[in-house]
Image (spheres, helix red, strand yellow):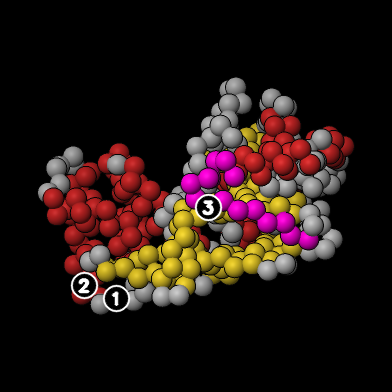
Amino acid sequence: MINKRLLIKNLLAHNDENSFYDKKRKVDISFKEGKAKFLKHICALSNSNPKNNSYIVIGVEDEDNKIIGVNFFDDSKIQNLINAYLTNPPIVQYENIPFPHLPDDKVVGLVTIRPTGAITSLRKNIWKYYGGAVFFRDGSMSMPKVFDIEIKDVNSKIVQAIESHAQNNIQYTLDGVFDFMNKRRDFNPQYMVFKEYFVLCWSGQKKVVKDETFYSRVDIELINEQVRLFFSTLDEVSISYDADRFKIVEYVSLGLHNRNKYYKLEETIIHFQDNANYTIETELLFEPPQFDKKVLHHIYNSNNVILEKLKNGKELNKYEELDLRNLPATYLICYLNAFEDAISKLNEAKPYLKNYSKKVYKLYQEAIRILRKVKYS
């Protein structure tokens, strides 16, 4: 089993990006330009590596390979995005890899691209790229090319050697368990072994509501591969497990006028198999709450007034400051109730919320995360 932290280190040892891996400081697929560039790199790496995996490492400075990390990204539906925009789409997996020196809410993103052997192209126009375009890697660049020659397999042996040197061992596993238990000791850390092989660590603050047990500040890591499977400081989560599987049900708090309810968002089940493999299944459970349209129109207009004040640098009164904290969630609720322009307004608010406070910006990120899950399901 590959230790993904070691794999990233081995990839970064090849200082410059090349035809089998790319590195990025960050990736933002919430906007059309970022989405288009991400799809271009997926397409190019898949086409340039027909016989081996290729990788994108996210959260690394380009000049000196310094690992700075990015926010935890839990979009299990990223394959849906790939399938929607690419012909002959490769199998793409995004994993969150913790590093000891990074803060709890930062990880390194690792995108693994498994080719299908067929030429991948854009299915339709996006940003400045035209449908039908085919991209390849030219050194460290993803470039459009006319495909008229057979692709040579030049990277399989190199990638195989890199992956071989990243195999896990008992020391790495034990170090990972001790590191997790020490780092999360304030949140009741636990570890479990599945099928005599897989070591899973998890922690969270426990609370019981009407005979149901929920956890907040949940952190879950698969130690063998050094992959963070779940991390949240805001959500409520229920956890259950048996000898073969570990199940997480994620809830989100939404409502108006500070009268929030918890709604099931997504169920994730990790299945552990006897052949030293595991699979992760996710199912969206979310059913958008519906509210009175007159009330929503009032809230939507109030949000727009607050946004205009932020854009013009005007001071908010104390009531508007309270409403600002709810602005990301209420714009999201408006969108889920057929206010189509609400998401454009929310995206427009991003830089102003970021400058206003870290807490408000985290609430914005949470709203975008929920939207992303709903949109691509």
Q: Residue at x 59, y 68 (%)?
A: 240
Classify residue 161 as left or right of residue 188: right
Residue 123 visible in the shown view: no
Q: Marks 1 and 2: CB-CB under 8 Å?
A: yes
Q: Which mark is residue 291?
A: 1
What distance separates the C-alpha of mark 3 from that of mark 1? 38 Å
User: Residue 96's x, y, as percent?
Assistant: 60, 46
Q: Judge depth for marks 3 and 2 and give the one in front.
A: 3
Task: Classify mark 2: helix, strand or loop.
Answer: helix
Where in the figure is residue 79, as x and y percent of width and height? Answer: 63, 59
Label 3, on which residue? 188
Secondary structure, mark 1, is loop
Q: Nearer the viewer, residue 1 or 377?
A: 1
- Whichever of callouts 3 and 2 sits on the residue coming sooner in the sequence is 3
Q: Residues within 10 Å of mark 2 (few under 14, many from 20)?
A: few
Q: Residues in magenta?
A: 181-195
Q: Residues within 10 Å of mark 3 (few under 14, many from 20)?
A: few
Query: Secondary structure under badge 3?
Result: loop
Query: Which residue is situated farthest in the left direction here?
Result: 317
Query: Does residue 307 belong to the magenta stretch?
Result: no
Q: Nearer the viewer, residue 169 or 144?
A: 169
Identity of the amino acid at label 1? Answer: Phe
Give the residue number, with chain letter if any, for mark 2.
295
Amino acid carrying mark 3 in the image = Asn
Q: Is residue 249 visible?
A: yes
Give the residue at x 61% y 26%: 65
Which residue sits at x=73%, y=67%? 244
- The amino acid pointed to by label 2 is Val
